[in-house]
Amino acid sequence: MKARSALLLGSLSATLVAFALTSPRVIAADKVDPVADAKAFQNFYFQKFPDVKHEDFVNGPYSMNEDMKRQWQEKEEFPPYEFALDAGKEMFATPFKNGKTYADCFPNGGIGIRQNYPYFDTKEGKVVTLELALNRCREANGEAPYSYVKDEMASLTAYMAFTSRGKPMDIKIPDDPRALAAFENGKRYFYTRRGQMNFSCASCHVQSPGERIRAEILAPALGILNAMPIYRSEWSGMGTTSRRFVTCNSQTRAVPLEPQADEYRDVEYFLSYVANGLPISGPGARP
Amino acid sequence: MKRSLPLAMLLALSLAPAARAANEADYKAAYAAAEAASKEAAGMRNQWTVTVSTLAAAKKAADGGDFDRAVAAAQEAEALAKASIFQATSEKDAWKAMEIR
Protein backbone atom coordinates (compact mmCIF):
# COMPACT_ATOMS: atom_id res chain seq x y z
CA MET A 1 0.00 0.00 0.00
CA LYS A 2 2.85 2.32 0.90
CA ALA A 3 4.59 1.50 -2.35
CA ARG A 4 1.39 2.27 -4.32
CA SER A 5 0.95 5.60 -2.54
CA ALA A 6 4.56 6.51 -3.15
CA LEU A 7 4.17 5.61 -6.84
CA LEU A 8 1.01 7.70 -7.12
CA LEU A 9 2.59 10.63 -5.30
CA GLY A 10 5.68 10.35 -7.47
CA SER A 11 3.78 10.37 -10.72
CA LEU A 12 1.64 13.28 -9.53
CA SER A 13 4.76 15.27 -8.66
CA ALA A 14 6.30 14.43 -12.02
CA THR A 15 3.15 15.64 -13.79
CA LEU A 16 3.15 18.88 -11.81
CA VAL A 17 6.84 19.49 -12.55
CA ALA A 18 6.27 18.81 -16.25
CA PHE A 19 3.31 21.19 -16.28
CA ALA A 20 5.26 23.87 -14.45
CA LEU A 21 8.12 23.58 -16.94
CA THR A 22 5.95 23.73 -20.06
CA SER A 23 3.36 26.34 -19.08
CA PRO A 24 5.70 29.40 -19.08
CA ARG A 25 6.58 28.60 -22.68
CA VAL A 26 2.93 28.58 -23.65
CA ILE A 27 2.44 31.95 -21.95
CA ALA A 28 5.66 33.31 -23.48
CA ALA A 29 4.35 32.66 -26.99
CA ASP A 30 1.53 35.17 -26.42
CA LYS A 31 3.50 37.57 -24.23
CA VAL A 32 3.99 41.12 -25.48
CA ASP A 33 7.74 41.53 -25.80
CA PRO A 34 8.64 44.95 -27.28
CA VAL A 35 12.39 44.36 -26.90
CA ALA A 36 12.25 41.16 -28.97
CA ASP A 37 9.91 42.80 -31.48
CA ALA A 38 12.23 45.79 -31.96
CA LYS A 39 15.24 43.52 -32.38
CA ALA A 40 13.46 41.37 -34.97
CA PHE A 41 12.14 44.46 -36.77
CA GLN A 42 15.56 46.08 -37.07
CA ASN A 43 17.29 42.82 -38.03
CA PHE A 44 14.77 42.30 -40.82
CA TYR A 45 15.84 45.55 -42.49
CA PHE A 46 19.52 45.22 -41.70
CA GLN A 47 19.58 41.79 -43.33
CA LYS A 48 17.35 42.77 -46.26
CA PHE A 49 19.50 45.81 -47.05
CA PRO A 50 23.03 44.91 -45.86
CA ASP A 51 24.61 47.80 -47.80
CA VAL A 52 22.50 50.50 -46.15
CA LYS A 53 24.12 52.09 -43.12
CA HIS A 54 21.84 51.63 -40.13
CA GLU A 55 21.50 55.34 -39.44
CA ASP A 56 20.58 55.91 -43.10
CA PHE A 57 17.20 54.14 -42.87
CA VAL A 58 15.73 57.33 -41.40
CA ASN A 59 16.15 58.95 -44.80
CA GLY A 60 13.37 56.82 -46.24
CA PRO A 61 13.42 56.32 -50.00
CA TYR A 62 16.81 58.03 -50.30
CA SER A 63 18.38 55.15 -48.39
CA MET A 64 17.04 52.79 -51.05
CA ASN A 65 18.07 54.60 -54.23
CA GLU A 66 21.42 56.25 -54.98
CA ASP A 67 20.15 58.60 -57.70
CA MET A 68 17.38 59.92 -55.49
CA LYS A 69 19.81 60.28 -52.64
CA ARG A 70 22.15 62.50 -54.67
CA GLN A 71 19.26 64.72 -55.81
CA TRP A 72 18.02 65.00 -52.23
CA GLN A 73 21.46 65.89 -50.90
CA GLU A 74 21.67 68.75 -53.39
CA LYS A 75 18.18 69.88 -52.45
CA GLU A 76 19.16 69.92 -48.78
CA GLU A 77 21.34 72.98 -49.47
CA PHE A 78 18.11 74.97 -49.79
CA PRO A 79 15.60 72.61 -48.21
CA PRO A 80 11.91 73.06 -48.98
CA TYR A 81 11.00 72.87 -45.28
CA GLU A 82 13.12 75.91 -44.42
CA PHE A 83 10.18 78.35 -44.36
CA ALA A 84 8.27 76.08 -41.97
CA LEU A 85 11.35 75.74 -39.81
CA ASP A 86 11.76 79.51 -39.51
CA ALA A 87 8.06 79.98 -38.81
CA GLY A 88 8.16 77.23 -36.18
CA LYS A 89 11.12 78.80 -34.42
CA GLU A 90 9.34 82.14 -34.25
CA MET A 91 6.07 80.59 -33.08
CA PHE A 92 7.88 78.58 -30.43
CA ALA A 93 9.43 81.70 -28.94
CA THR A 94 6.31 83.88 -29.16
CA PRO A 95 4.47 84.06 -25.81
CA PHE A 96 0.80 83.12 -25.48
CA LYS A 97 -1.66 85.80 -24.38
CA ASN A 98 -0.96 84.83 -20.76
CA GLY A 99 2.76 85.44 -21.22
CA LYS A 100 3.82 81.80 -21.09
CA THR A 101 5.42 79.94 -24.01
CA TYR A 102 5.64 76.38 -25.33
CA ALA A 103 8.91 76.04 -23.43
CA ASP A 104 6.93 76.12 -20.17
CA CYS A 105 5.05 72.95 -21.15
CA PHE A 106 7.99 70.69 -21.99
CA PRO A 107 11.06 69.22 -20.32
CA ASN A 108 14.28 71.09 -21.15
CA GLY A 109 12.21 73.97 -22.48
CA GLY A 110 11.14 71.81 -25.44
CA ILE A 111 14.62 71.83 -26.97
CA GLY A 112 16.20 68.54 -28.09
CA ILE A 113 13.38 66.34 -26.83
CA ARG A 114 11.76 65.05 -30.04
CA GLN A 115 13.39 61.63 -29.57
CA ASN A 116 11.30 61.01 -26.43
CA TYR A 117 7.96 61.33 -28.21
CA PRO A 118 5.51 59.67 -28.18
CA TYR A 119 5.56 58.58 -24.55
CA PHE A 120 3.12 56.57 -22.47
CA ASP A 121 1.36 58.71 -19.88
CA THR A 122 0.75 56.44 -16.90
CA LYS A 123 -1.76 58.90 -15.39
CA GLU A 124 -3.91 59.03 -18.49
CA GLY A 125 -3.19 55.43 -19.44
CA LYS A 126 -2.62 56.43 -23.06
CA VAL A 127 0.07 57.34 -25.56
CA VAL A 128 0.84 61.06 -25.85
CA THR A 129 2.37 62.25 -29.11
CA LEU A 130 4.30 65.46 -29.63
CA GLU A 131 1.46 66.91 -31.70
CA LEU A 132 -1.03 66.11 -28.95
CA ALA A 133 1.26 67.56 -26.26
CA LEU A 134 1.60 70.78 -28.28
CA ASN A 135 -2.15 71.24 -28.59
CA ARG A 136 -2.65 70.40 -24.92
CA CYS A 137 -0.07 73.05 -24.10
CA ARG A 138 -1.99 75.58 -26.18
CA GLU A 139 -5.32 74.69 -24.58
CA ALA A 140 -3.86 74.77 -21.06
CA ASN A 141 -2.72 78.31 -21.80
CA GLY A 142 -6.06 79.48 -23.17
CA GLU A 143 -5.20 79.16 -26.85
CA ALA A 144 -7.22 77.36 -29.55
CA PRO A 145 -5.72 74.07 -30.74
CA TYR A 146 -4.13 73.85 -34.18
CA SER A 147 -5.06 71.47 -36.98
CA TYR A 148 -3.10 68.26 -36.46
CA VAL A 149 -2.20 67.71 -40.09
CA LYS A 150 -0.26 70.71 -41.43
CA ASP A 151 0.52 74.43 -41.28
CA GLU A 152 1.28 75.66 -37.74
CA MET A 153 1.50 72.16 -36.22
CA ALA A 154 3.94 71.09 -38.93
CA SER A 155 6.03 74.22 -38.37
CA LEU A 156 6.20 73.75 -34.61
CA THR A 157 7.10 70.07 -34.82
CA ALA A 158 9.63 70.87 -37.58
CA TYR A 159 11.44 73.23 -35.25
CA MET A 160 11.34 70.82 -32.32
CA ALA A 161 12.62 67.98 -34.51
CA PHE A 162 15.39 70.20 -35.85
CA THR A 163 16.66 70.91 -32.34
CA SER A 164 16.82 67.14 -31.79
CA ARG A 165 18.56 66.13 -35.02
CA GLY A 166 21.04 63.34 -34.61
CA LYS A 167 19.73 62.28 -31.21
CA PRO A 168 18.83 58.59 -31.12
CA MET A 169 15.13 57.77 -30.84
CA ASP A 170 14.56 56.85 -27.21
CA ILE A 171 11.02 55.64 -26.57
CA LYS A 172 10.26 54.01 -23.24
CA ILE A 173 7.64 51.40 -22.52
CA PRO A 174 6.94 51.50 -18.78
CA ASP A 175 6.19 48.34 -16.85
CA ASP A 176 2.47 48.89 -17.17
CA PRO A 177 0.06 46.47 -18.86
CA ARG A 178 -1.71 49.41 -20.51
CA ALA A 179 1.54 50.53 -22.14
CA LEU A 180 2.19 47.01 -23.42
CA ALA A 181 -1.38 46.87 -24.70
CA ALA A 182 -0.88 50.19 -26.54
CA PHE A 183 2.31 48.84 -28.14
CA GLU A 184 0.53 45.64 -29.17
CA ASN A 185 -2.44 47.60 -30.50
CA GLY A 186 -0.09 49.75 -32.58
CA LYS A 187 1.59 46.67 -33.93
CA ARG A 188 -1.77 45.16 -34.85
CA TYR A 189 -2.79 48.36 -36.62
CA PHE A 190 0.47 48.39 -38.57
CA TYR A 191 0.01 44.85 -39.89
CA THR A 192 -3.76 44.88 -40.42
CA ARG A 193 -5.02 45.08 -44.00
CA ARG A 194 -7.64 47.71 -44.68
CA GLY A 195 -9.37 49.57 -47.48
CA GLN A 196 -10.60 48.29 -50.80
CA MET A 197 -6.97 47.83 -51.89
CA ASN A 198 -6.57 45.35 -49.01
CA PHE A 199 -3.24 46.90 -47.98
CA SER A 200 -1.69 47.15 -44.56
CA CYS A 201 1.06 49.62 -43.66
CA ALA A 202 3.37 46.60 -43.88
CA SER A 203 2.28 45.74 -47.44
CA CYS A 204 4.25 48.75 -48.68
CA HIS A 205 6.78 49.50 -45.98
CA VAL A 206 7.81 45.97 -44.95
CA GLN A 207 7.18 43.86 -48.04
CA SER A 208 8.20 46.38 -50.68
CA PRO A 209 10.62 49.09 -49.48
CA GLY A 210 12.86 50.19 -52.32
CA GLU A 211 10.29 49.07 -54.90
CA ARG A 212 8.38 51.51 -57.05
CA ILE A 213 4.71 52.21 -56.61
CA ARG A 214 3.89 54.25 -59.68
CA ALA A 215 6.60 56.95 -59.74
CA GLU A 216 7.52 56.71 -56.07
CA ILE A 217 10.10 54.62 -54.25
CA LEU A 218 8.62 53.10 -51.12
CA ALA A 219 10.31 53.94 -47.83
CA PRO A 220 11.23 51.30 -45.25
CA ALA A 221 9.08 51.35 -42.12
CA LEU A 222 12.23 51.34 -39.99
CA GLY A 223 12.90 54.94 -38.99
CA ILE A 224 10.01 56.27 -41.06
CA LEU A 225 8.84 58.58 -38.26
CA ASN A 226 12.32 59.85 -37.39
CA ALA A 227 12.06 62.26 -40.33
CA MET A 228 8.69 63.73 -39.35
CA PRO A 229 7.33 66.23 -40.09
CA ILE A 230 8.06 66.29 -43.82
CA TYR A 231 7.76 68.57 -46.80
CA ARG A 232 6.18 66.50 -49.55
CA SER A 233 6.28 67.71 -53.12
CA GLU A 234 3.08 65.71 -53.67
CA TRP A 235 1.37 67.88 -51.02
CA SER A 236 3.16 71.06 -52.09
CA GLY A 237 3.68 71.67 -48.42
CA MET A 238 4.44 70.35 -44.98
CA GLY A 239 2.67 67.47 -43.28
CA THR A 240 2.75 65.97 -39.82
CA THR A 241 2.78 62.35 -38.71
CA SER A 242 -1.01 62.60 -38.46
CA ARG A 243 -1.19 63.70 -42.08
CA ARG A 244 0.98 60.78 -43.16
CA PHE A 245 -1.30 58.23 -41.46
CA VAL A 246 -4.45 59.86 -42.84
CA THR A 247 -3.17 59.94 -46.42
CA CYS A 248 -1.82 56.38 -46.20
CA ASN A 249 -5.29 55.20 -45.17
CA SER A 250 -6.96 57.16 -47.98
CA GLN A 251 -4.57 55.72 -50.54
CA THR A 252 -5.72 52.21 -49.63
CA ARG A 253 -9.32 53.47 -49.99
CA ALA A 254 -9.98 53.20 -46.27
CA VAL A 255 -11.82 56.02 -44.53
CA PRO A 256 -9.09 57.57 -42.33
CA LEU A 257 -9.58 57.84 -38.59
CA GLU A 258 -9.67 61.22 -36.93
CA PRO A 259 -6.13 62.61 -36.34
CA GLN A 260 -4.79 61.55 -32.94
CA ALA A 261 -7.27 58.67 -32.68
CA ASP A 262 -6.07 56.03 -30.22
CA GLU A 263 -5.09 53.73 -33.08
CA TYR A 264 -2.88 56.37 -34.69
CA ARG A 265 -1.29 57.23 -31.34
CA ASP A 266 -0.58 53.55 -30.74
CA VAL A 267 0.88 52.88 -34.18
CA GLU A 268 3.14 55.91 -33.72
CA TYR A 269 4.24 54.43 -30.39
CA PHE A 270 4.99 51.07 -32.03
CA LEU A 271 6.86 52.51 -35.02
CA SER A 272 8.87 54.90 -32.89
CA TYR A 273 9.83 52.24 -30.36
CA VAL A 274 11.08 49.80 -33.00
CA ALA A 275 13.24 52.66 -34.38
CA ASN A 276 14.94 53.21 -31.01
CA GLY A 277 18.62 53.99 -31.47
CA LEU A 278 18.21 55.49 -34.93
CA PRO A 279 18.77 59.25 -35.20
CA ILE A 280 16.11 61.92 -35.50
CA SER A 281 16.41 63.41 -39.00
CA GLY A 282 13.33 65.63 -39.15
CA PRO A 283 12.16 67.78 -40.62
CA GLY A 284 12.46 65.79 -43.82
CA ALA A 285 11.76 66.31 -47.50
CA ARG A 286 10.10 63.70 -49.66
CA PRO A 287 8.96 63.54 -53.30
CA MET B 1 -47.32 23.69 -88.37
CA LYS B 2 -46.43 26.94 -90.04
CA ARG B 3 -48.99 28.76 -87.89
CA SER B 4 -48.14 27.07 -84.64
CA LEU B 5 -44.57 28.43 -84.42
CA PRO B 6 -45.46 32.15 -84.35
CA LEU B 7 -48.29 31.33 -81.97
CA ALA B 8 -45.96 29.50 -79.65
CA MET B 9 -43.48 32.39 -79.77
CA LEU B 10 -46.25 34.87 -79.00
CA LEU B 11 -47.38 32.73 -76.09
CA ALA B 12 -43.84 32.43 -74.75
CA LEU B 13 -43.27 36.17 -75.00
CA SER B 14 -46.51 36.97 -73.28
CA LEU B 15 -45.67 34.66 -70.42
CA ALA B 16 -42.11 35.95 -69.99
CA PRO B 17 -41.90 38.41 -67.07
CA ALA B 18 -41.38 41.90 -68.34
CA ALA B 19 -38.29 43.73 -66.92
CA ARG B 20 -39.80 46.15 -64.45
CA ALA B 21 -38.26 49.54 -63.85
CA ALA B 22 -37.19 50.09 -60.23
CA ASN B 23 -39.33 52.44 -58.19
CA GLU B 24 -38.76 54.53 -55.07
CA ALA B 25 -39.74 51.70 -52.75
CA ASP B 26 -37.10 49.43 -54.33
CA TYR B 27 -34.53 52.14 -53.87
CA LYS B 28 -35.46 52.77 -50.25
CA ALA B 29 -35.17 49.07 -49.42
CA ALA B 30 -31.82 48.73 -51.20
CA TYR B 31 -30.48 51.92 -49.62
CA ALA B 32 -31.57 50.89 -46.12
CA ALA B 33 -29.76 47.56 -46.47
CA ALA B 34 -26.62 49.28 -47.77
CA GLU B 35 -26.71 51.91 -45.05
CA ALA B 36 -27.05 49.28 -42.32
CA ALA B 37 -24.03 47.36 -43.63
CA SER B 38 -22.08 50.59 -44.00
CA LYS B 39 -22.83 51.57 -40.40
CA GLU B 40 -21.70 48.17 -39.21
CA ALA B 41 -18.39 48.60 -41.07
CA ALA B 42 -17.93 52.07 -39.61
CA GLY B 43 -18.61 50.66 -36.15
CA MET B 44 -15.72 48.25 -36.75
CA ARG B 45 -13.60 51.26 -37.73
CA ASN B 46 -13.10 49.74 -41.15
CA GLN B 47 -15.15 51.85 -43.49
CA TRP B 48 -14.06 52.04 -47.14
CA THR B 49 -14.06 55.32 -49.05
CA VAL B 50 -15.72 53.62 -52.04
CA THR B 51 -18.66 52.52 -49.89
CA VAL B 52 -19.28 56.10 -48.86
CA SER B 53 -18.99 57.46 -52.41
CA THR B 54 -21.19 54.70 -53.88
CA LEU B 55 -23.87 55.34 -51.25
CA ALA B 56 -23.72 59.04 -52.14
CA ALA B 57 -24.06 58.15 -55.84
CA ALA B 58 -27.16 56.06 -55.04
CA LYS B 59 -28.75 58.98 -53.23
CA LYS B 60 -27.89 61.39 -56.02
CA ALA B 61 -29.44 59.10 -58.65
CA ALA B 62 -32.59 58.71 -56.54
CA ASP B 63 -32.84 62.47 -56.06
CA GLY B 64 -32.72 62.78 -59.84
CA GLY B 65 -35.50 60.19 -60.20
CA ASP B 66 -33.27 57.50 -61.77
CA PHE B 67 -34.27 54.61 -59.52
CA ASP B 68 -32.71 51.91 -61.71
CA ARG B 69 -29.33 53.50 -61.27
CA ALA B 70 -30.03 54.28 -57.61
CA VAL B 71 -30.88 50.66 -56.80
CA ALA B 72 -27.82 49.37 -58.65
CA ALA B 73 -25.54 51.79 -56.76
CA ALA B 74 -27.13 50.95 -53.41
CA GLN B 75 -26.65 47.24 -54.05
CA GLU B 76 -23.02 47.86 -54.98
CA ALA B 77 -22.52 49.91 -51.81
CA GLU B 78 -23.99 47.08 -49.74
CA ALA B 79 -21.62 44.57 -51.36
CA LEU B 80 -18.65 46.87 -50.67
CA ALA B 81 -19.69 47.36 -47.05
CA LYS B 82 -20.07 43.61 -46.58
CA ALA B 83 -16.61 43.06 -48.06
CA SER B 84 -15.14 45.55 -45.58
CA ILE B 85 -16.89 43.77 -42.71
CA PHE B 86 -15.44 40.47 -43.92
CA GLN B 87 -12.00 42.08 -44.11
CA ALA B 88 -12.21 43.47 -40.57
CA THR B 89 -13.39 40.12 -39.22
CA SER B 90 -10.75 38.01 -40.95
CA GLU B 91 -7.95 40.46 -40.12
CA LYS B 92 -8.58 40.04 -36.40
CA ASP B 93 -6.23 37.07 -36.62
CA ALA B 94 -4.84 37.22 -40.14
CA TRP B 95 -2.60 40.24 -39.38
CA LYS B 96 -0.29 37.99 -37.38
CA ALA B 97 0.80 36.24 -40.57
CA MET B 98 2.45 39.49 -41.76
CA GLU B 99 4.32 40.18 -38.55
CA ILE B 100 8.13 40.31 -38.54
CA ARG B 101 9.30 37.83 -35.93
Image: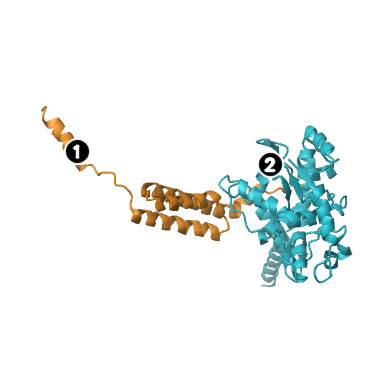
Q: Quadrant of residue A124?
A: bottom right
Q: Dot 2 lies on which element? A: loop
Q: Residues within 10 Å of mark 1 (few under 14, many from 20)?
A: few
Residue beneath disc 1 = B12
What color does chain A have in the rendering? Answer: cyan
Q: Amino acid at mark 2?
A: Gln
Task: Determine the residue positioned at 58% across, 49% down.
Answer: A195
The part of the image, by quadrant, that contains residue A43 is top right
Question: In the image, which disc is placed on residue B26?
Answer: none
Name above or below for residue A1 compared with residue A114: below
The chain that appears orange in the image is: B
Residue A15, percent across and down? 68, 64
Residue type (three-letter) at the residue carrying disc 1: Ala
Q: Quadrant of the C terminus of chain A?
A: top right
Residue B58 image position (x, y, % from top left): 44, 51
Of all chains, the one bearing label 1 is B
